[in-house]
Image (cartoon, rainbow, N blue to C red):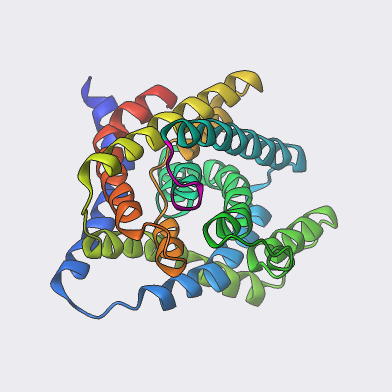
Amino acid sequence: MNLDVFSTLFSVIAPVFLIAAIGYGWGKSGKTFDTPMVTMLVINIGVPCLVIDVLLNAELSAEALTEMALAAFLALSATVVVSAIVLKATGLSFQAYLPALTFGNTGNMGLPLCLFAFGDEGLALAIGYFVVFIVLQFTLGIGVASGRFSPKELARSPVIIAVIIALGLMAGDVTLPKWADNTIGLLGGMTIPLMLLTLGVSLGRLHVQTLGRSAALGCLRLGLGFAAGWGVAELMDLEGIARGVVIVESAMPVAVFNYLFAVRYNAAPAEVAGMVVISTALSFATLPFLLLAVM
């Protein structure tokens, strides 16, 4: 690896790793960090504002966003099918493990990685991917973990409402007043740092109790996600930034939200915690190779 390539990879990975490390240290120190409150703040205010701000300023076409949403849906569908086959063959619980194998950390890790690797256009495309995942995670994911499904949650999702608003403004070629644009930009700007800090704090507080199974399933999540992203990129003949975003977002480790759902619905939370910690640690170790494959 020559010096220029190393410098490029380091500039992408270092901010993500360092901010998450600050959160990790904070979590290990025992200092107060209200993870549920910060998570709700990010999901209900930060992410919706980031969606509107980025989509309005990225100058992406509706076709590009639609293509990214389709890629996310296909990658997720492939992951669900293969994960279900593996869980059926091994006799493991769908309720406990299917959400963790399906939903990667497309927000806390995926968005900043795509921003630093591919710039503002990469972030905009990653948001198109992320929106599909977050909506399905908070509907299908919760439905599997809890054993019940509520379509009403979809209509009430702040992220969905933000996407509808952004697409409406884009279609009407509407320019927001400067005060509104600045306010939305400031609120959206808090999202990525808070996501990374929360990821670090969560990793610092989680404990691996079942190493073997958690490690195997965590590795499966990373390998399956990468294969799904690569396969969808080939199937859709994606190139350039779009291809890179799909593969990076698909290859993310187990999302922390899966652990929160597992705790809430008593769906093997200790093993899901292990999957989060181990897959995230492996992901940081393999990030240089992942980025080399797509940049």
Relative to 168, say whether 9 is above or below.
Answer: above
Q: Is residue 288 left or right of residue 170?
A: left
Q: Is residue 142 visible?
A: yes
* Nearest the eye: 123 or 180: 123
User: Residue drawn 69% across and 42% down?
Assistant: 65
* Nearest the eye: 145 or 36: 145
Q: Measured from the top left, where is residue 64 in percent x and y?
A: 70, 37
Question: Which image quarter: residue 57?
Answer: bottom right
User: Residue drawn 23% across and 49% down?
Assistant: 210
Image quadrant where one finds the N terminus: top left
Residue at the far left in the pictured view: 29
Magenta stretch encompasses residue 271: no
* Nearest the eye: 206 or 41: 206
Question: Which image quarter: residue 28?
Answer: bottom left
Q: Is residue 5 left or right of residue 166?
A: left
Q: Measured from the top left, where is residue 227 in percent x and y?
A: 47, 25
Q: Is residue 152 left or right of residue 195?
A: right
Relative to 13, say whether 138 is above or below.
Answer: below
Highlighted range, magenta: 91-96
User: Residue drawn 51% across and 71% down?
Assistant: 186
Q: Measured from the top left, where is residue 66 in percent x and y?
A: 73, 40
Magenta stretch encompasses residue 92: yes
Relative to 278, say whether 167 is above or below.
Answer: below
Image quadrant where one finds the C terminus: top left
Q: Measured from the top left, where is residue 250 in percent x and y?
A: 49, 37
Relative to 156, say whether 280 is above or below.
Answer: above
